Structure formats: C-alpha cells, structure tokens
Amino acid sequence: MSPTVFRHGALRFYFFSREEARMHIHVDSPEGEAKFWLLPEIELARNHRFSKRDLARIRKLIEEHEDVIRKTWNEHFSS
C-alpha cells in the first residue's frame, strides 16, 4: 500500500506502508523519482532523473506541506 499524501501538478507525494520506520516521503512524476527524509531534517535520500532545479522545487513543496505529511504519516502508521 502506498497512500498518496498530496499531488502538485504531475508530482505525486506518497509513502510505502512497508518500508523503514524513519519518516520520509517519496515523490514521482514522468520526469523522475526521489525520496526525502523528514527526520532529523528534510534531506534528499535518493534521486533518479530529477534535475537540481526540480529537486529544489520539490523540497520547497515538502517544506510547505510538512505539517500534512507528518500528520498523514502519524495517522497511517498508528493504525
């Protein structure tokens, strides 16, 4: 299961239910895929095909939606 947290244009922000416990978010689009850690701070974990410019834009979106990402994570993994 990989619940979608939010979408922004062609970008889908989501996480996998059966992955490591450290809080993180995945993002993908036709242009690429990436994973960002949220703890201890927002940090790129891995990238496949996104440009540096795209990654900066994605990071900004994660920062803007950090509260909803954390809330969704906590709700999903507490059940």
Image (cartoon, grey):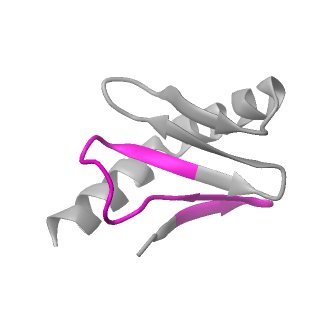
What residue lies at 32% left-to-right and 43% top-to-bottom? 23
Q: Nearer the viewer, residue 57 or 48?
A: 48
Q: Position of residue 43 (x, y in %)?
A: 49, 25
Query: What range is drawn magenta here?
Result: 5-26
Q: Nearer the viewer, residue 23 or 7?
A: 23
Q: Position of residue 68 (x, y in %)?
A: 43, 54
Q: Position of residue 10 (x, y in %)?
A: 79, 61
Identify the image quadrant of the N terminus: bottom left
Task: Name the side, left or right, on which 55 lies relative to 65.
Answer: right
Task: Name the side, left or right, on which 48 lies relative to 1.
Answer: right
Q: Position of residue 42 (x, y in %)?
A: 46, 27
Query: Relative to residue 11, is residue 49 depicted above or below?
Result: above
Identify the image quadrant of the C terminus: bottom left
Residue 6 within the magenta-colored segment of the rendering: yes
What residue lies at 64% left-to-right and 32% top-to-bottom? 60
Query: Relative to residue 3, is residue 32 depicted above or below?
Result: above
Residue 11 location, quadrant: bottom right
Query: Relative to residue 21, is residue 58 depicted above or below?
Result: above
Residue 73 within the magenta-colored segment of the rendering: no
